[in-house]
Image (cartoon, helix red, strand yellow):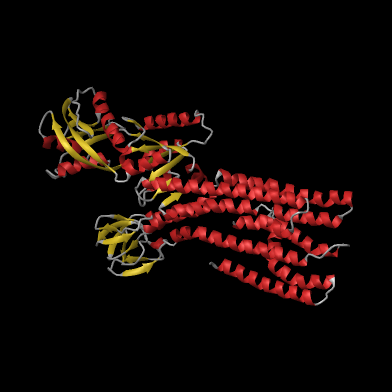
Amino acid sequence: MNNEAKEKLRQIIFAAIMLVIVFLINRFIKLKIWQQFLIYLIPFIYIGLDVFKEAVEGIKGKEIFDENFLMSIATIGAMLIGFLPNSEPEFNEAVFVMLFYQVGELFEIIAEGNSKKSIEALVKIRPDYANLVTEEGKTKKVSPEDVNVDDIISINPGEKVPLDGIIIEGTTNLNTVALTGESVPRGVKEGDEIFSGCVNINGTILVKVTKKFSESTVSRIINLVENANEKKSQTDKFITKFSKIYTPIVVFSAIAIAIIPSIITKDFITWINRALTFLVVSCPCALVISVPLTYFGGIGGAAKKGILIKGAKYLETLSDINTIVFDKTGTLTEGVFEVVAVHPSLYDEEKILHLAAHAEAHSSHPIAVSLKKAYEKIKNLDDNCKITETEEIAGLGVKTKVNGDIVFVGNDKLMEKINIEYEKCDKVGTTIHIASNDKYLGHVIISDKIKEDSKETIKKFKDMKIRTVMLTGDSEKIAENVSTELGIDKYYAGLMPEDKVKRVEEIIKENENSKSKKKRKVAFVGDGINDAPVIARCDIGIAMGGIGSDAAIEASDVVLMEDKVSKICDAIKISRKTQKIALENIYFSLIVKFAVLILALFGLAQMYLAVFADVGVTII
């Protein structure tokens, strides 16, 4: 229980004791009305003072019609009604109603505190200090904000990783649970990249800083989670608008209930009492509080599992997804390519790999990396070959000069574009053709591995009645092979970046033209910035971010801090459960509230029941 809840509990206990004492005094000593009023006024003011202050603040800020205003005028009316002719005093009821309201506030504080726990756990990953290595080789504790890029820091066992960087000395295991939700330690060694927010377990390491603290993983995550609730869901926005219209209506309705029947029946006491009860039950806090709190809890629960959702509206959209579109490489597959075959037409295998590797020398694309690795198994890539005029051809390959010879390395479409006849290959994998000086030299087969959890995840989507589509720039054969193995409903192969956007637009149109009354949303799962146009076009973008991916955190609506597609199932389950609870809260609150409003109108609901309809329903 946090300090605010403890203080509220102390206030309630003290007020309850005072109420019992005052009740006993009134029970055994015959007091006049004004004397009863004075002794009940003490616990009434004590327990209701903060409510009265909030009501005054609301009036000053021109936000008059809130629960504090309603509780104030209803309970003050109950305190004063005993002074009217032929009426019974309701001092005890007024104090008890305010006390019960504060009990509701206590439960509300506790509930909100529980919802915040997982988010607070994330915020606690913020490091307190960094061990900066000075030029003399000594270390000194400094604020992470004071460390610059390329500075060297030392991280001891048990300490948080304060900034993103690359290990230059030492090996260790990292606890990444705060970022990924996974409890299995991650082994790291010299040359590996590590990210702030992890905890060093068992080895001292030296790290070269690659990002300022303001741009580090931990800073971006904290900022993302703390601001997530600013993006309201449609349900949340509806409740806010509803309460602003609804509350003034019931206030003026209560005034009408107090005046019009009183004039007709001449029974002012009865109708004023009913009007006061009507005011208490009309308070909309069960709606205004419980619905945002539900979404806040959903975002917090997702964050605990390493799923960062950038706002309540995205959490709501996730629950309406009926189609998920996947990028293939790095999402359903590992994105780690290796050369599995070399088929030369001219020259030998070594010469083919030599030209391919040198043509891709300046590229960091996974296919380029695999070509360079394959050649380096034979010879050193740094062999003083002259590489000039390198040109990336989007979606096709690369053109460059190697020792003065023009070399093309790329897919079937590149060969067709430069009018070179190429050989087809039946082997499953990505075919990379090599041509030089208008001659076809041969091709290389590169294969990618399917992720361990991809097949099971696709099966889960089928069980959830979610359609799956795969988009890839790879060949029809590779796409068909991956799609069949995983059980993908539909795939599109050989796509350029702009083709992916067109395909997604077609899928969205299919959904819009569907006869189903249920909302149907399309999600795209990719690797962040490379798929930014598609992510922007979809209803919701989900990034396989991995720890510390700039592209993921910046480009998408939902970030999976670990590269596991199974996390998407968790995200959708959380969103559906959250949406279900939010709707249950709305229906239950409105049904109880309108039922008690009608009972209050006919004098069948006492103020205790009115408070239950408001505060009690909020707690439930």
Q: Which residue ends up furthest to the left in the rendered image?
A: 348
Q: Can I make out residue 186 in this image?
A: yes
Q: Can I make out residue 151 in this image?
A: no
Q: Is residue 197 above or below residue 565?
A: below
In the rendered image, residue 538, in percent from the top left (x then y), is placed at 45, 36
Q: Is residue 334 above or below residue 32?
A: above
Q: How many marks?
A: 0
| Nearer to me, 132 or 45 | 45
| Nearer to me, 575 or 164 | 575
| Nearer to me, 215 or 17 | 17
For this view, does 552 lie left or right of residue 411?
right
In the rendered image, residue 10, in percent from the top left (x then y), is placed at 61, 71
In the rendered image, residue 348, in percent from the top left (x then y), is placed at 10, 33
Q: Residue at x 85, y 49 (%)?
A: 261
In the rendered image, residue 386, in percent from the top left (x then y), is placed at 17, 38
Q: Is residue 610 above or below residue 313?
A: below
Q: Residue at x 65, y 48 (%)?
A: 590
For this view, does 487 lie left or right of residue 125?
left
In the figure, residue 446 lies in which quadrant? top left
| Nearer to me, 210 or 95 | 95
Which image quarter is the C terminus in?
Answer: bottom right
Q: Residue at x 15, y 40 (%)?
A: 385
